[in-house]
Image (cartoon, rainbow, N blue to C red):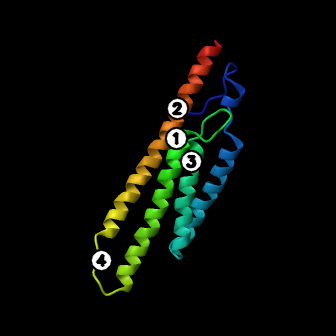
Amino acid sequence: MLSTPDATAPADAVKMPLAARRLVLIGGLCIPVGLVAGPYLFGLQLVAVAGVVAVAIALSYQRGQSWFSRWSWLTTAAGALWVIATVAYWLSIMAAVDGSSSPSSLPTVLFYIGMAALSVMILGTIAGWTSRLLSDRRSVAAAR
């Protein structure tokens, strides 16, 4: 639920940092491009995945001097693992399709690694949001 900023809240508590806003814009543009063009080229499916990662990193920001929090680092690492697992998954499927051999269990393992990385990325984003919410409440309570 969006609310109007509290007059007692610190000025920096109202705004998302500029770098995080830019990352949301870039990721937000990448997602529809990847979804629309993804069925035609695999590389553009990765653009959608990278867009989701960028938005998740941006939403895990912290307020203060450095917007890139420990939750942002966790989200970035999990997002990078998700992108790498997606590429490896696709390459292993293509290798099985192009070859005459039966598919191995590698695609299944890569799929679960990707899902685990996505879950960690989502948890990191939620933790960053929760941490920011709690620090905002503490700063408002201290100002009263």
Q: Earlier in the sequence, mark 2 or mark 4?
A: 4
Is residue 137 something that shows in the picture?
yes
- Which of the image's four quarters has the C terminus? top right
Q: Where does label 2 land, which residue? A: 131
- Which of the image's four quarters has the N terminus? top right
Residue drawn at (70%, 20%) of the image: 7
In x, y percent, where is residue 38? 53, 70
Secondary structure under badge 4?
loop
In x, y percent, where is residue 73? 54, 45
Residue drawn at (62%, 29%) of the image: 3
- Amino acid type, callout 4: Pro
- Res 135 quadrant in image: top right
- Amino acid type, callout 2: Ser
Q: Where does label 3 land, which residue? A: 57
Classed neighbour count for the residue bearing mark 1: other residues with Cα under 10 Å, few (<14), some (14–19), many (≥20)? many
Q: Where does label 4 land, which residue? A: 103
Q: Earlier in the sequence, mark 4 or mark 1?
A: 1
Gap between marks 4 and 1, in whole Å? 37 Å
Q: Is residue 26 left or right of residue 48?
A: right
